[in-house]
């Protein structure tokens, strides 16, 4: 299957998921091809008649913007830019995020406002389609003059033929790929290096990945909440629609409806309860889970605007006969929402850990630490410690990156977004929350088995039956980390509607 990148149809996050899940290849639409070529031709003609220096086209970069470059050196200027800016360090960017970076950079070019050559754009498409994924590093972007550093590392092997890549999952020097495919390094034209490096594709790719992950975690959190509620012998009234109609936040209504649906038909949820109220981690779950849902939806809307925009600099406007230097590369819109997304998703982990604690606290007929013979057996004592440690780390990660700034480029770039850091830490938060939810699932399934012979709902019983194919009931103490890892794997691979 082919996805045609086009300026005529906005790229949605849901469509990105389809492209990745179905292993679709990319191609440019006729309109995208026309616009890219039109913009490049316009820029070539503009340079023949332009007398005034054009930033990044006939000048140096950043604080070197007042230094003019001769026509004979313009190609070398762009090549030097990519080489000198490839300064990434730290852990490698996950390959699934690098794949998104390639696609979103092409999406950026399809509008025809960047001045890239058609062959440059096509090379990025070829790398995506042929599973040639450049090695990019997580640290180096200030999230301001574009994601300069990681995008330079992305373009160094793909465009200039320097450095290393993963090719069908195997790490190798990119020269091996070039030899096999008959590729040659692309000779960059004026502005092209800047067009490749200016942009927010590092931040926005992490953003797309994180939104997709957060959407999945939000659904799983509701499923696990329903299981924990039944295992805890909780009350269903806090999830009644009549209650939530008087405070009708959309996410809150969605969460309450989901829990009602997941618990429908349960013998446990409908039986008489002696207790009048549940702890907040159960009773206020619609409000907490719902606020996270609303945040995820808002963040998704901002990121979709970003990935359907031109974010390099200067912007080339052929129809208006204008080349304008501005600040579309600045990552503040991404930095703020990535911080927000991390905070919202972290709360799903925080409330999950509290439900785990309630399950092991010898309440409502459940044994201490969810084992039949506590004392001799510690049971589920320490998985809660693990969840608490992860939640604590996640809270620390949620310190906003977007409120920080360190000036750079001789103070020409005097306020930066630190959106690159917001992006990478948001990824870590998603991974952490998944682990915390997996631990709650591990505990809740154990607790439910102490309610037998009573049955939960058909949905929950199937969820637990599927989980039991991966993780058994714990009768006496066992090595627990293997079961926790299996629980994480279950969440990563389970089908979520």
Image (spheres, grey):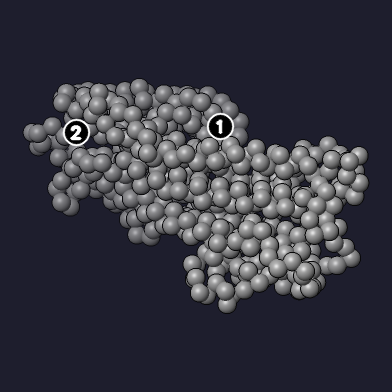
Which residue lies under the disc numbered 2? 55
The picture places residue 396, in percent across and down from the top left corner, at 53, 37
Mark with earlier residue (2, 1): 2
Residue name at image x 39 percent, y 54 percent = 302
213 lies left or right of 7:
right
Q: Nearer the viewer, residue 469 or 322?
A: 469
Kindly indicate the quadrant of the structure image that contains residue 483. top right
152 lies left or right of 273:
left
Can you name the residue that lies furthest to the bottom here?
242
Q: Nearer the viewer, residue 78 or 298?
A: 298
Residue name at image x 19 percent, y 33 percent = 55
The image shows residue 229, relative to residue 76, as above or below, that is below
The picture places residue 218, in percent across and down from the top left corner, at 59, 56
The picture places residue 274, in percent across and down from the top left corner, at 77, 69
* Neighbourhood count class around disc 1 (C-alpha, 10 Å): few under 14, some 14–19, many 20 upward: some
Residue name at image x 51 percent, y 59 percent = 291
The image shows residue 383, relative to residue 212, as above or below, that is above
Kindly indicate the quadrant of the structure image that contains residue 253. bottom right
The image shows residue 130, relative to residue 367, as above or below, that is above
451 lies left or right of 61:
right
Estimate the spatial distance between the alpha carbons at disc 2 and disc 1, rounded to whole Å. Answer: 35 Å
Q: Are marks 2 and 1 in contact (CB under 8 Å)?
A: no
The picture places residue 31, in percent across and down from the top left corner, at 32, 55
Residue 166, labelled with which disc? 1
SS for callout 1? strand
């Amino acid at each position: 299957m082919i996805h045609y990148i086009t300026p005529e149809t906005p790229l949605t996050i849901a469509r990105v998921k389809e492209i990745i899940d179905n292993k679709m290849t990319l191609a440019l639409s006729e309109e995208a091809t026309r616009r890219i070529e039109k913009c490049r031709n316009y820029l070539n003609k503009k340079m023949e008649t332009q007398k005034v220096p054009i930033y990044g086209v006939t000048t140096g970069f950043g604080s070197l913007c007042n230094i003019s470059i001769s026509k004979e050196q313009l190609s070398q200027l762009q090549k030097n830019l990519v080489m000198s800016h490839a300064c990434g360090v730290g852990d490698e960017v996950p390959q699934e995020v690098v794949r998104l970076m390639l696609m979103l950079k092409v999406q950026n070019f399809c509008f025809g406002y960047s001045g890239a050559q058609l062959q440059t754009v096509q090379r990025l498409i070829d790398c995506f389609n042929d599973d040639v994924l450049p090695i990019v590093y997580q640290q180096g972007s200030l999230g301001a003059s574009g994601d300069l550093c990681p995008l330079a590392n992305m373009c160094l092997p793909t465009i200039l033929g320097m450095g290393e890549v993963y090719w069908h999952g195997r790490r190798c020097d990119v020269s091996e790929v070039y030899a096999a495919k008959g590729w040659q390094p692309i000779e960059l034209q004026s502005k092209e290096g800047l067009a490749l490096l200016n942009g927010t594709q590092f931040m926005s790719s992490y953003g797309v990945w994180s939104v997709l992950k957060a959407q999945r975690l939000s659904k799983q959190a509701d499923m696990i909440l329903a299981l924990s509620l039944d295992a805890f012998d909780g009350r269903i009234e806090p999830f009644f629609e009549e209650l939530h109609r008087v405070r009708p936040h959309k996410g809150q209504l969605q969460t309450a409806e989901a829990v009602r649906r997941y618990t429908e038909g349960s013998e446990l949820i409908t039986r008489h309860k002696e207790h009048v109220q549940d702890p907040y981690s159960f009773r206020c779950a619609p409000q907490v889970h719902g606020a996270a849902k609303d945040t995820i939806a808002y963040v998704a809307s901002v990121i979709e605007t970003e990935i359907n925009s031109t974010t390099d600099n200067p912007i080339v406007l052929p129809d208006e006969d204008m080349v304008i230097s501005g600040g579309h590369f600045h990552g503040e819109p991404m930095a703020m929402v990535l911080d927000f997304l991390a905070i919202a998703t972290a709360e799903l982990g925080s409330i999950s850990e509290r439900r785990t604690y309630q399950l092991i606290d010898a309440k409502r007929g459940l044994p201490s630490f969810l084992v039949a013979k506590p004392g001799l057996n510690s049971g589920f004592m320490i998985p809660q410690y693990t969840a608490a440690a992860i939640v604590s780390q996640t809270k620390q990660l949620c310190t906003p990156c977007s409120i920080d700034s360190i000036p750079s480029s001789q103070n020409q770039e005097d306020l930066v977004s630190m959106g690159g850091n917001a992006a990478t830490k948001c990824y870590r938060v998603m991974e952490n929350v998944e682990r915390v939810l997996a631990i709650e699932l591990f505990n809740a399934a154990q607790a439910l088995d102490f309610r037998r012979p009573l049955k939960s709902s058909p949905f929950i019983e199937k969820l637990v039956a599927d989980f039991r194919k991966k993780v058994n009931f714990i009768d006496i103490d066992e090595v627990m980390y293997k079961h926790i890892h299996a629980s994480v794997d279950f969440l990563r691979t389970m089908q979520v509607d």
